[in-house]
Amino acid sequence: MSQKILVAGSGKSGIAASRMILETGDEAVLYDSNDALKKDELLSQFGKTDKISVILGELKKEDLKDISICVISPGIGLDAPFVSVLKEENIPVWSEIQLAYHHAKGKLAAITGTNGKTTTTALTGEIMKAFYERVYVVGNIGIPYTQEALKTTEDSVTVAEVSSFQLETITDFHPDVSAILNITPDHLNRHKTMECYIKVKESITVNQTEKDCCVLNYDDLVLREFGESMKPRAIYFSSRNSLDEGYCIDGDVIIRNHGGNREEIVNINELNLLGRHNHENVMAAIAIASELNVPMEVIKKAVCEFQAVEHRIEFVAEKAGVKYYNDSKGTNPDAAIQAVKAMPGPTILIAGGYDKNSEYDEWIESFDGKVKHMVLLGQTREKIAECAAKHGFTNVMYAEDMQEAVKVCASYANKGDYVLLSPACASWGMFRCYEERGEIFKECVRSL
């Protein structure tokens, strides 16, 4: 018997979820609180005979007649006014990944964490593709899980990048292998407290059993402690400590210690990824792939061939002896710290953007003489400048747009320097998304 399902949010995730609902024979009601949108334009993305309707503006109780489930897009907070209406009517709220999981088949690896998710997901996906015939790489990486779920088979493997926003509304979402790469302050404007943010991240394991496993960062004390209490088996990786069990770095070599045996896997100098944080991402991907039975020789080859993901410390160009790197995905201070650490020499930094209630002290302190100048954009520029001054860093300039920022950097950079876009802030306000911010940065660099 078909159901009537409400989809909240008309962006990429909402459209993909609606299409999947229609494909499974259910009826979709697409809802968006933005009453300035045009119903005809939204409906044009579906077939004329599809059982779909559109509601814009305020959601009323009478709109919920016969609705069995609401699928909420990740960009919508659970404090949105219409969510309380759903609760009053006892309508379950699912995330888009929960809906996809409900229909998907095969093995599932799910990766979360504050930073490194996209690189680890992309790398894990490439390793899987080198061994398995049917592999789907989905989630926060840019391809909605609902877009691919109905294509999965019992023999396929899905690798999903999962955000805290998506984990808020899971019910029986159950990965065979999960990973939590790290947890540092982020999205506190939505989650309110660090305790709540941690709890949401750790919920990726809530439906896992003793037969499953979770890959954890041993160097993150919160995760190390969590590994002792969770149901699935813990597999640790560390870039700072030697582990008797798990993955770690000995000199320049990533090794696996297991059951008293030491296995050398790959020399970090053979990788195309810069920075210790990326070596952690590599260890996490190796651990996930190994748990999904990929032979180590296949893993090593894929890891050595893998190139940096777009917008994650991505080399753009060299101009007049200055190298430019795009780390637009550095949307919080901890990610931006890793990018600064990865730069091999004197750096001019472009930063600033939308305020997610982050604190910038630790980031400014990480400059440690490497950052020569900082060019600030967006809503947070005064807040960051004040924080920098408090820590004795005064080489700060403002720019009104990305083009001006890049030109200022070029004028201050000397041969052998590095220019890095790593904003430590979200892109909203000036750009639609971090991808657009990164693309505009690259265009500005190439036109120098």
Image: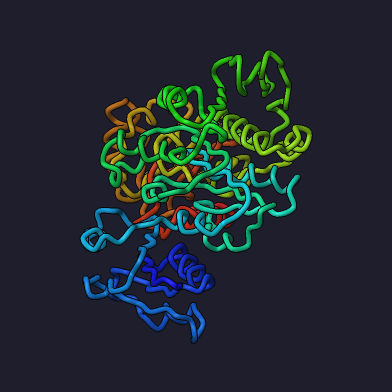
Using the image as rendered, state which of residue 343 and residue 45 is in the foreground. Answer: 45
Using the image as rendered, state which of residue 427 and residue 28 is in the foreground. Answer: 28
In this view, 97 is above or below 307: below
In this view, 84 is above or below 3: above
From the top left corner, tell me how far across and down residue 27 is, in percent: 43, 75
Using the image as rendered, state which of residue 444 and residue 356 is in the foreground. Answer: 356
Which residue lies at the image location 47% right of the left edge and 82% below the top edge?
A: 44
From the top left corner, tell me how far across and down residue 120 is, in percent: 58, 40
The figure's colour scheme reads: rainbow
In this view, 213 is above or below 8: above
Which residue lies at the image location 55% right of the left edge and 37% below the top edge?
A: 418
Figure disc tally: 0
Q: Quadrant of residue 290?
A: top right
Indicate the quadrant containing the N terminus: top left, top right, bottom left or bottom right. bottom left
Residue situated furthest front in the rendering: 1
Does the rendering let one see residue 148? yes
Which residue lies at the image location 71% right of the left edge and 15% below the top edge?
A: 261
Does the rendering let one see residue 339? no
